[in-house]
Amino acid sequence: MKHRAKRIAAAILACLAAGLLPSNTLAEQSRNTPKEEVVYVSLEADGSFGRAYVVNAFDLSKPGTIVDYGDYTTVANLSTTAPLDFEDGRVRADALAGRFYYQGDLTSARLPWLISVTYLLNGKPVEAASFAGAKGRLEIRLGIRDNPKAEKTFATHYALQVSVALDTQRCEGIRAEGATIANSGKHKVVSFIKMPDTDADYSITADVEAFEMEGIQIAGIPLTVDMSLPDTGQLTGGFAQFQNGIRDLDGGAGELNEGAAGLADGAGQLCDGLRRMQSGLGDVEGGLSELVGGNGGLLDGSKQIKDALNEIRTQLNGFSVTTSDLSRLAEGSAQIARGIGELSGGIDALGAGFSRADGGVSALTGGAFSGLHEANEATVAALNDRIAVLMADEHADPAEVALLTQAAGLLTANDELVSGLKTGIAGDGTGENPGLAAGAAALNAQYAQFNAGIQELPSRLGDMAAGITRLKEGIDALAGNYGEFHSGLTDYARGAASIHGGLKELCKGFNELVKGGTDLSAGLKALQEGTLRLKDGTGELRSRTQNMDAEMQARIEEMLETYTETDFDVVSFVSPRNTNVESVQFVMVTDGIAAAQDEEEPAQKESDGPGDFWGRLLALFGL
């Protein structure tokens, strides 16, 4: 791996110069000697774990024996050439007073952070191995998340510094939001700071040509900021004013809710009153509608009365009766009475004639026939018999047959006429047909009574003439007054129709008013509910903010303590059995991106003895 560690080698070498002393002069040292750990992690180009080693440093006030723990695969003494006792994760070493170092290698480790690196060329992901020498638009995406399966202390208290060095001869237009970009020779170093307990997503873009890049360096150290807390009195004082405003707002919301409740109650009463008025107006409009509907018939009836009075007045004006007229009327009525009497007598005489004729027939036939009807029937029967004989005789005279047939028909018709007259005069004994004689007698009797009244008219004419005159005057006055009444009735009907039309419009408008009142009531109820929710909200806001100044002060101090707190228990990265750890640092470097070398560099010749140690030490730090 090609990477550069921080240049602490000079200090290490100075300590090593004083550490080359014989081991037999060492004294026993406490097993819990304070120590420091520096974890060097080699990451793959995509940020995944590659390998790691830990440099453990101890400060000894006097020579002694050091005991340390770690799940290492191999260990190496970096201070002396003396071997280390390493067995079952325990490292034991004899050290002189001063600084002592040893290295432990790890093939696996659970880092406190999960790191991912993605490279994109012209918007398309590319593998780092095929990215060297590329040309186009570069984007490097770096994501860092806390590892939930690792020790929490490091992610909670450590900040990460991410450094990406880009060659300005290969990269142009370097952009990185939220980063600090500084010049370092021909390089621009893009630096990000990830704070504890936060996730990080970084992006770096540039236009590249013949692209190569050193590895991305990520250093993890405890975040300690030497700063004094600022005076937050002005800020919290402002919150006190804010709290007072919220208290006033809560009180105003209460008053607003009470006012809205009063408005809603008043609107409800108004709406109820409007509905009752609407119902009453509906009844009035319905009754007036029926009245107006009946006015047509009333006007027609009034007009008929008016016309009838005018007609009576016209007839009375043309009516004139004199004594001579009534005398002629009485004389004519007397003549009618005499005629009806004569008619009744004639009908009686005709009936008597039929009776005498039947008696004569009976006498002439010696009692063989009781009347004309029986004689006609016998004669017709004899004629029919004779006609039948003649019809059977082929030598019969047709003229005789015709004559006999005609005679039979005449006799039959005469018999029917006589029977009808007799029945008409005498009747059939039922109420439907009492007979002409009875009817004539009744008519004669009835007309006799009528004629008696007619005969009295001339004497009564004087009294009737005066009554007719008064009647004519009354009818004239009534007709005139009724004309005015009818005109007034017509005007009333027009006025009632106009009132009805206006009332209908009033009802329409009032319906809209009721609808508006209903909407107003609903709106005010919604307003009341809204102000109630506002009151609840302001009450809750007041409750939650009444201690806001103190809570804010505590929160500010808590947030600042995140960056100023140094008092936390440092734990060992390699083993929980190391209980006296003063500091742990992380140095993580990804593989760089470089074009393949045409010729391999000659391998350095390995040598035995102390020179091999120095070579390993310098190679450890990339020197």
Image: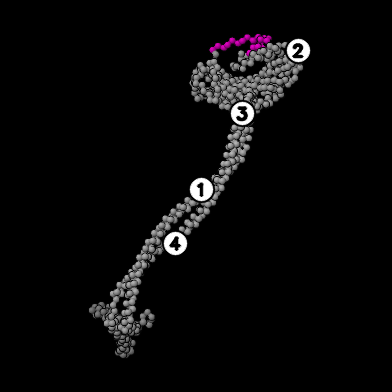
Residue drawn at x 68%, y 20% is 36
Q: Which is more toward the observer, 182 or 477? A: 477
Could you tell which of marks 1 and 4 lies nearer the N-terminus? 4
Say few, some or many: other residues with alpha carbon within 10 Å of mark 1 (under 14 / 14 to 19 / 20 or more). Answer: some
Q: Secondary structure at mark 2?
A: helix
Q: Which mark is residue 230?
A: 3
Indicate the quadrant where residue 444 lies.
bottom left
Question: Which is more foreground, mark 1 or mark 2?
Answer: 1
The answer to which of 157 and 589 lies nearer the viewer is 157
Mark nearer the viewer, 4 or 2: 4
Q: Residue beneath label 2, please?
A: 25
Q: Mark 4 to mark 2: distance in Å? A: 131 Å
- At mark 1, the secondary structure is helix
Residue under pointer 4 = 287
**Does label 3 or label 2 sit earlier along the sequence?**
2
Write the residue at 62% across / 23% down.
Answer: 220
What residue sits right under mark 1 in the picture?
Answer: 523
Q: Earlier in the sequence, mark 4 or mark 2?
A: 2
Magenta-drawn stretch contains 96: no
State whether residue 258 is above or below residue 11. below
Q: Which stretch did the figure color magenta?
A: 598-618
| Residue 498 seen anywhere in this rendered image of the structure | yes
